[in-house]
Image (tube, rainbow, N blue to C red):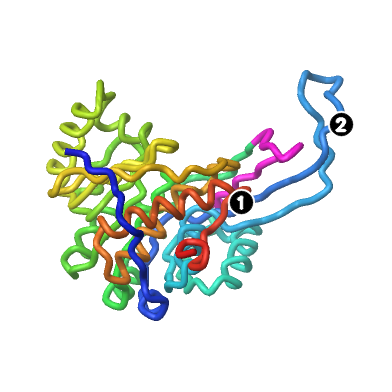
Amino acid sequence: MTRPYTHQLESVDRTTLAASRVLVVGDAMLDRYWHGPVDRISPEAPVPVVRITRTEERIGGAANVAYNVITLGAQASLVTVVGEDEASHALEALVAKTGIVTHFGRDAALKTTVKLRVIGRHQQLLRLDFENTPPSEVLASQSATYAALLPVHQAVLMSDYGKGGLTHVGDMIAAARAAGKPVLVDPKGSDYSRYTGATVITPNQAELQQVIGAWNDEADLTAKAHAFRQKLQLTAVLLTRSEDGMTLFDADGELHVKANAREVFDVTGAGDTVIATLAAMVASGLSLRQAVPLANKAGGIVVGKFGTATASYEELFA
């Protein structure tokens, strides 16, 4: 039976949170924004002409996930793979200002992922992605780094953007579980068997439908989600449902949390904030059921902001 969450949000002591360490592994990227007014339509094609007046760079992907952990007041280490290019150095310079402890693997054959968004009239008009698949040997070289960092972190977060940075995710999950560490996965793609044994995965509705098929009603969803959870030996599945909140499926049944009623400005990076908050709270000692309402609130905060954003401790516990 699905039980709505109606209790007070769990409070986390700031000192406890500050001592909590989350190991983030995955695909880091650079988010670029080009802003400008749109005053006319191009005579060459029926498209708006944006006169660029301002540019902006932010950390994205797994780096943004780690930054969300930091902003909440916990500690984060980032294991990722980037190229030996201009974008990687721009990303590294931005990350250096955040307090994230970084472990960058590099390879000249890799193009650092860049997402370039063109913004006109406060709306995203176009996104251009620059990327390629990293060589597997670079990813393998990070395995030793991961193994060395594992013992000194309370939780592991796998941020999979499908860019190739988590080729060895199965081995990493097995190592973390053997060490008694909870593993939280933001999944990607249609083959979730590689996440077997994780503590929790956090798909959205479209992502979950891709792997378990469409559902007719809540009862059908519940049956399929639990069967899927058991098949992959997961402790829980957290389904994020946009304006319908989120539902946790675990051995105790289902826990549904309603979405925060607030204006949605930009959903970019909301999933990063949700799983980062979940990981930070679990690392500080909360159970998944205690952490889910806080993750839901944090997601509601960042959709009210522009672009890849974060939620602070003050905002979360206000």
- Residue under label 1, please give it: 31
Bounds of the magenta segment: 110-126
- Residue under label 2, please give it: 39
Amino acid tagged 2: Asp
| Residue at the image point whose x is 51% and y is 64% from the top | 67
Left or right: 50 in relation to 61: right
Classify mark 2: residues with Cα within 10 Å, few (<14), some (14-19) or many (20+).
few
Left or right: 149 in relation to 310: left
Above/below status of 264 relative to 138: above
Q: Can residue 168 be found in the magenta stretch?
A: no
Counting from the top left corner in percent of width and height, residue 250 is at 18, 48
Name the main secondary structure of what is drawn in magenta. Answer: strand
Counting from the top left corner in percent of width and height, residue 171 is at 23, 58
| Residue at the image point whose x is 62% and y is 64% from the top | 89
Q: Say which of 245 and 78 sits in front.
A: 245
Q: Can residue 113 be found in the magenta stretch?
A: yes
Q: Nearer the viewer, mark 1 or mark 2?
A: 2
